[in-house]
Amino acid sequence: MNLLPADTYIVKNATILNDESRFVLIKLYQPIIGSVAINLYFTLWCNLDASKIISTEYTHHNLMAEMRIKLEDILEAREKLEAIGLLKTYLKKGSINSYIYELYSPLEPSEFIDNPILATTLSSNIGKAEYEKVLNIFKIPKIDLRGYKDVSATFANTFEVTDGLEISDTKNIRKVQQIELIVDEKIDLNEILELIPSEILNHRSISKETRSLIYKLAYIYNLDDKELIELIRNSVDERKMIDKNLLRLNCHNYYTFEHQNVTPSLVYKKQPEYLRKTASDGSKLAKQIYTFETTSPYDFLSGKNKGVKPSKKDLLLIENLMIDYDLPPGVVNVLIDYVLRINDNKLTKNFVLTIANQWKRSNIKTVEEAMKICKKENKNKSKSKVIKKEIKPEWFDKKVEENLASSDDIAALEASLKNL
């Protein structure tokens, strides 16, 4: 999208926001989407008027000045809020584009931890020890109630019921609203379920919630149709229903076994839409750019390995590029391709990270930018390989006349040497 500083926006509050929301955003969401995205959310929240429902109209120039960041950084932060379910964006095109930013509540801590994608991503970002500390913050402390009796008053014993008013329409009354996390449906779930006999699985028992969980597990653990069939079959209980907790456990155990106890990472992400080339002329270069942009680093490296899964070492290196060096997936693909070409098909860690550091300093974000810098480096290397013409001193080819010393000269030289 061609977002401009002059483009206007208003903020609409579609939910109920409170101090607990702030705490959840900082503790659970910030380690995943970063401080800039959280700061954008809080800034939009502050833009709301006294009613806390809707804001006046602002320009994005105002947002840039308030946050002290570039417009492209605002766009990137907005995409993260949209992807994680905190924001919806509506656009009305015109000579000056108008946007509506609709705020949604973060998930309750229990719902967040129950979401396999969010919980796994948080754990991989902050580490297992820190993850356990975060969980303890939201746990209810256990108090021994033995010897105590519940003496709480009931409603009927406290209040008297009288004739009331008619029940009003409550459809438009504000309530806590959240956005379901949407993932790419890379599997054919209908076909998977059809391949499991009805004697094993009761197909009518599969709810929308269960289907959503399967899609999320397939996404975070990078499972294909064949793997899922076996995992689902092993997660059916005696009532022929899918045990969701058992399915989670089976998927986790299968993944960690296949990847030597490494937790799922971000290497399956693809280049974000806003960083992709919008037009294609059908040329070989355009097709190459499209491949880099629409393939995850995991799949790209698998292709380079002739279909063999990348090693644990290579996966950790790729994740390092995406997290520590903040390189988008498409740019990581270009880097992998470039290093393999010039380094005898070897992904040498120090060599890769040296290039990644240069690209990070150069703020390389798109595939085109990455390909241009590779082309420039190739030209520089080609120039350095050109054999320079040997430069000879002026005297090299000149004839030097022979001038023999006389006997008197030799005698004088020998006398000088004796004195020394």
Image (cartoon, rainbow, N blue to C red):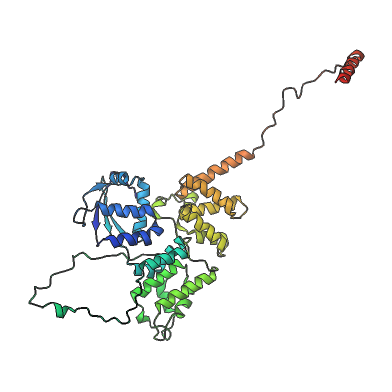
Residue 5 found in image quarter: top left
Q: Is residue 29 left or right of residue 223?
A: left
Work out which residue is located at the far front of the displayed protein and give it.
147
Rendered residue at 57%/40% (across/down):
380
The number of discs equals 0
> Against 121, is 203 above or below?
below
Q: Position of residue 42 (x, y in %)?
A: 30, 54
Figure quadrant of the C terminus = top right
Residue found farthest to the left: 163
Q: x, y percentage for residue 325? A: 48, 52
**Res 187 seen here:** no
Q: Is residue 350 left or right of residue 19?
A: right
Task: Determine whether 94 is above or below 87 in the image.
Answer: above
Q: Position of residue 181 (x, y in %)?
A: 35, 65
Residue at 51% from the left image edge and 44% from the top image edge: 373
Percent from the top left, x then y, of residue 331? 48, 52
Seen from the viewer's position, the closer of residues 149 and 418 is 149
Residue 45 visible to the viewer: yes
Question: Taking 389 as reference, is 108 above or below it?
Answer: below
Query: What's the residue at 29%, 44% (across, down)?
Result: 61
Residue 37 image-quadrant placement: bottom left
Specify the quadrant of the image occupied by residue 336. Answer: bottom right
Residue found 35% across the figure and 70% down from its top: 110
User: Which residue is most to the top?
Assistant: 408
Left or right? Give the position of 1 relative to 254: left
